[in-house]
């Protein structure tokens, strides 16, 4: 297993290949086009297992705070601790001890993951998503 940093020039190919086999996500998730083009606008870190991209985080860093814009583990690899490792490696890589993110109130799987990781609720943004759902604003301090 290896960590791929935002500096890697492989991101365009890695993301295109990942999205070719990605099942259609629910409406509140990032679409394939957004993911494939993410490296043009944002930073990305990820984990490779046996030559395949298995988990990735799209993010930005501002004043020492790492803001997660989107993260995903390939369906076949979920529940194996990969995203936990990926976020920890990313914090080490960026030298950040604070994370912030937003999550759809109905995304119980991600909310469970964030709770388990140690995130805490900072507030909500009502009707934040196109489907009318609220965003939970979460933060983590190492
Ligand atoms: C949320 C997500 C990234 C978690 O990735 P993951 O690699 O499966 O997470 P991990 O295996 O590192 O999980 C660590 C912990 O989170 C919790 N967890 C993760 N998935 C869970 C699930 N389906 N049900 C219950 N708990 C879960 C567990 O407590 C787990 O701890 P454990 O390994 O000690 O049991 C993954 O489910 C995913 O890609 N979801 C779809 C995309 C998405 O919703 N992104 C978030 C947008 S804001």
Image (cartoon, rainbow, N blue to C red):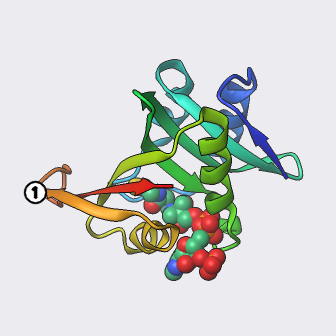
Name above or below for residue 126 compared with residue 5. below
Is 2 left or right of 90, judged from the image as shown? right
The furthest residue to the right = 50
- Residue positioned 13% across, 57% down in the render: 132
- Residue positioned 48% across, 36% down in the render: 59
**Residue marked by disc 1:** 126
Is 10 left or right of 26, judged from the image as shown? right
- Callout 1: SS: loop
Residue 43 visible in the picture? yes
Is 19 left or right of 121, judged from the image as shown? right
In this view, the residue in front, 139 or 113, is 139
Where's residue 129, x and y in %?
A: 20, 51
Where's residue 108, x and y in %?
A: 38, 74
Name above or below for residue 70 compared with residue 7. below
Is 10 left or right of 121, judged from the image as shown? right
Where's residue 95, x and y in %?
A: 59, 36
Q: Dot 1 surroundings within 10 Å: few (below 14), some, or many (20 or more)?
A: few
Where's residue 117, x and y in %?
A: 51, 67
In this view, the residue in front, 72 or 23, is 72
- Residue positioned 52% across, 26% down in the render: 37
- Whereabouts is ligand 1, in terms of quadrant? bottom right
Name above or below for residue 71 compared with residue 81. above
């Amino acid at each position: 297993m290896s960590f791929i940093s935002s500096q890697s020039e492989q991101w365009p190919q890695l993301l295109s290949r990942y999205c070719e086999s990605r099942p259609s996500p629910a409406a509140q998730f990032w679409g394939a086009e957004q993911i494939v083009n993410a490296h043009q606008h944002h930073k990305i870190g990820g984990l490779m297992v046996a030559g395949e991209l298995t988990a990735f985080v799209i993010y930005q860093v501002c004043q020492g705070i790492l803001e997660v814009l989107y993260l995903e583990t390939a369906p076949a690899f979920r529940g194996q601790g990969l995203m936990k490792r990926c976020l920890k490696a990313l914090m080490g890589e960026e030298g950040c001890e604070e994370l912030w993110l937003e999550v759809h109130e109905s995304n119980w799987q991600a909310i469970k993951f964030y709770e388990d990781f140690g995130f805490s609720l900072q507030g909500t943004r009502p009707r934040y998503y196109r489907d009318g759902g609220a965003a939970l604003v979460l933060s983590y301090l190492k």
